[in-house]
Amino acid sequence: MANNKINMSDYKIQIDSLYSYFERGKTLYGDKALYRFNQKTTGSTIDVSYKEMFELITDLALAFQKKEMAGKKVILIGETTVQWIASYISTVTADGVIIPLDPHLLEEEIIKFTKLTKASYVICSKAHAEIFLAQADELTEVEGFIVTDRETFALYPEQEYVEEKVTTFNNLLALGRYLAKNTDMTINMRDHDIKKLSILLFTSGTTGSSKGVMLCERNICAVLEGIYPMLAGLTPEDSVMSVLPIYHTYEMSAGILAPMLYGMTICISDGIKYVGKNIKQFKPSVMTLVPLFANQLYKTIQKNVQKQGKEKALAMGLKISNFLMKLHIDARKKLFGQVLQGLGGNLKAFIVGGAALNPQIAENFANFGIQVRQGYGITECAPLISVVPLHEKNNPASCGKLMPGMQIYIDKEKSTDTFGEIVVKGDNVMLGYFENPEETAKVLSPDGWFKTGDYGYIDDEGYIYITGRKKNVIVLQGGKNVFPEELEEYLEGVSLIEEVVVVGEENKETGVVSVVALVYPNHEECTKLGLVEKDDIYNAINEEIQSINKRLASYKHINKLELREEPFEKTTSRKIKRHTIKKNEQ
């Protein structure tokens, strides 16, 4: 997908606010579809144009201004909808603080965060409204509840506004429409401060810590300015499908906001269960994914090929394609047309972040003509730090080049070390942790340098490589460091393994640390090979591990294998929660 004809000077942009960003979209792309989604009850597919979305945000922000939202905190919870996006942008525009929550949190956690933040308003889906209203008497700080519903969405609700504590999104929008048509109220951007707290994210991630990451509007704008040249080459002819949870800043920044830079249409999926169906319906050219989704999509391709008995035909097609590519002849669309049609027919790139991706998966998709570009980020950086540019030759082992506008250095413990902690600085770095100055001071220096907690290094061409998470590193008795992520990458390539986590296990008597692989087997694959009994599955996987050990330095060898009965617990962005692994497994 590299394109040397791209003029990078065309990809410089200054974004003064999220409101002006949507105004830019209206000006440049007008009636072109910005969002596309299905309504299950009507069976129809609805488009919302760039112009319509800007008007919706404007009217909703006017309603929020009327309610004197400045400085007030707003809980936002539910699945990906146009109302969710509009609520986010309009709250920030009206000088409020938006607090996106994971819709899969336990009820008590949802209520806990609402009380902790002293939220004044709650914007939620119908399902979550029941949770809040059941506890309404305890939520004394909450002034109003606003209920969203994809099935009743209306750009121009034909109703008069009714003042009520529990109301609908359409009713609030009706207030905004009235204010826009019948009063002199306008969006007050003159006193709008994009460097104050405007987004508060509680992200436990995989470690179990519930720190509140405080972001300002400038953080998000900086990410959009930085990503613009990195994905140069995308055009209004391209479309993206939103699959990942929207409350996560990766999906909001990269999957929802960034495509607007290029005039793309964003197709909102019906949910995880419908991804395959939606890909064929929406025919996206780009998707933002986490590695687990990329792995699952490739496994789906493999299963379909096996069902059709075309393994040999595919292998021959790959050989022919690779030979022709050496002659600069690209026949992949013809050779792998059926595979590509299973992914909608237009897919040309995955942007993968959130965890390390096995480079082999990237290579496998590239064989079909689909580029997989890795990125690296962390919520505290809103979240982007680096990405492999679309217009350059791919480097699947790397998580990319530093985003423009940022600074980086590798903090090595010893000058002779080949890696160290990645430390970054830029306008996208958070303000700090909510009501937690002690934790903020541990990671954020007074002059703005942020310690990511990730180990890595940078090569001579500026590509960043992540070697592992600082918290996860296994320190052996002799002082050697083993990064679980590296070993997990090898093990994920074993077809008999569905999920794996590598941990260190210390012998309390001797102090010797062993490297242990905790594995949930791929039972479907095991059954195909006649492996049913646990001992047989164990022996087969252990044999694969011994084969991997032969390719590794001796100190990195996996010393022990333990099989799990159940899959690992995961976040809604499909990352394994390491902190939930039982103590007797560590």
Image (tube, rainbow, N blue to C red):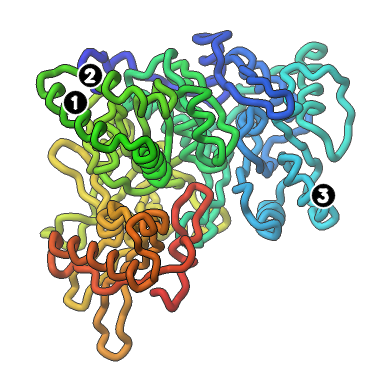
Distance from the alpha carbon under mark 2 to that under mark 3: 58 Å
Identify the image quadrant of the C terminus.
bottom left
Front of the two marks 2 and 3: 2
Q: Point out the tag, 2 or 1, that comes first from the N-terminus.
A: 1
Count of number-bearing discs: 3
Q: Earlier in the sequence, mark 1 or mark 3?
A: 3
Q: Which numbered marker is on residue 531?
A: none
Q: Amino acid at mark 1?
A: Ser
Seen in the picture, residue 72 relative to 480 is either above or below; the reply is above
Badge 1: residue crowd in 10 Å (few <14, some 14–19, many ≥20): many
Side of 457 where 238 appears, left or right: right
Distance between mark 1 and mark 3 Cα atoms: 59 Å
Residue 289: image x %, image y %? Answer: 42, 38
Tell me the amino acid under the disc marked 3: Leu
Pointer 3 residue: 133
Relative height, residue 455 to residue 351 (above, below): below
* Residue at position x 32%, y 27% in the image: 230
Side (left or right) of 251 relative to 100:
left
Q: Nearer the viewer, residue 369 or 61?
A: 369
Q: Residue at x 56, y 36 (%)?
A: 274
Q: Which residue is mark 1?
A: 321
Report the residue at 82% width, 27% height from top: 171
The residue mark sitting in front, 1 or 3, is 1
Kindly identify the residue that appears in the image at 42 percent across and 28 percent down: 342
Give the residue type at disc 2: Ala
Element type where label 3 sits in the image: helix
Residue matched to label 2: 331
Could you give the CA–CA distance between mark 2 and mark 1, rounded to whole angstroms? 6 Å
Query: Residue 262: x, y in percent?
Result: 43, 18
Q: Are marks 2 and 1 in contact (CB under 8 Å)?
A: yes
Query: Which is more toward the observer, 398 or 47?
Result: 47
